[in-house]
Amino acid sequence: MAVLTQTEIAEKLRGEDLNHWLELWHAEQGPAKRSSLELMAAVVPASKEKDVRVLDICCGPGDAGRALGSRFPTASMDFVDRDPFFASLCAAVNQRDGFAGRTLVRDLSSPNWSQDLASSYDVVVAANGLHWFTIQEVTELFTEVIELLRSRGCFLFMEPTRPEFPFQSGFATWQHTQPGQHRHEDWIHFWSSVNAFLGYDHMPLDARPPEGRIGDTLSALDWVGLLKTAGFEAIDILLRDTEKVVVAGLKP
């Protein structure tokens, strides 16, 4: 079967139970993500009455952007993801729930992905998408992100992490005593449902991760270092739990 376009996927989603798809996604992302997104929205240094401009990159179905939109009711938002299913689902949920903004299919590892986007966002946010890139790609992306922000605009992201080397063994021993945040069977359930819905292997279930991707190889301070290299300041580690880190930085 031919691969569907974004327009065809959007049409196919009409009449679908969007909450069902969100529930599958939230199960795949794990129970701790929601509070992390609420934290990211809460720390944006702006009044809730401000007309903030938000860019959600690697947006998936748009959870991070909508978390910010819930705090800033008059926000204008752009959502970007390279996956046409995610972009279509994001746009459908945004329209249903009254969140204004564009949803664009763009590959952030490609040149000119930010063409025709604004250059004065108040907030750029990313949730669990950057670890699919290589270090070189993320280094370049952070430089592009800072260019998209206005002065004193903030960049917030949540990503998998690991401890610094001397602490890895003990951390791993402790980690195994804690409740897991992700289950592989939830990943399988989500993508097998997407494949069945589209009628072809949109995400091959036996696919290997891209060669050289970051995954969970960076420590919290490694992520901080990438922000510093890009020119961010007032950098803070807002949250560190058993599996992930939430980091923020301001453009000077």
Image (tube, helix red, strand yellow):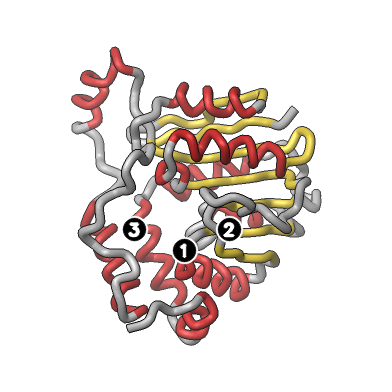
Outermost residue to the top:
166
Tell me what residue is drawn at x 68 percent, y 51 percent: 54
Q: Disc 1 marks which amino acid?
A: Asp
Q: Nearer the viewer, residue 56 or 116?
A: 116
Secondary structure, mark 1, is loop
Which quarter of the rendered picture does the N terminus lie within? bottom left
For label 3, count other residues whose C-alpha is less than 10 Å away and answer few (under 14), some (14-19) or many (20+). Answer: some
Q: Disc 3 marks which amino acid?
A: Ala
Outermost residue to the front:
111
Asked if residue 222 lies left or right of residue 118, the reply is left
Q: Is residue 46 above or below residue 169?
A: below
In this figure, which residue is indicated by the disc labeled 1? 83
Mark 3 in CB contact with mark 2 (< 8 angstroms): no
In this figure, which residue is indicated by the disc labeled 3? 27
Asked if residue 24 lies left or right of residue 95, the reply is left
Label located before the other in sequence (3 or 2)? 3
Secondary structure, mark 2, is strand
Task: Name the image quarter holding residue 20.
Answer: bottom left
Q: Is residue 188 above or below residue 235?
A: below
Q: Of the residues tagged 1 and 3, which is closer to the observer? A: 1
Secondary structure, mark 3, is helix
Tell me what residue is drawn at x 43 percent, y 47 percent: 33
Q: CA separation, marks 2 and 1? A: 9 Å
Q: CA separation, marks 1 and 3? A: 19 Å
Place of residue 58 in the rendered image (x, y in percent of width and height, measured from the top left): 51, 53
In this figure, which residue is indicated by the disc labeled 2? 80
Q: CA separation, marks 3 and 2? A: 22 Å
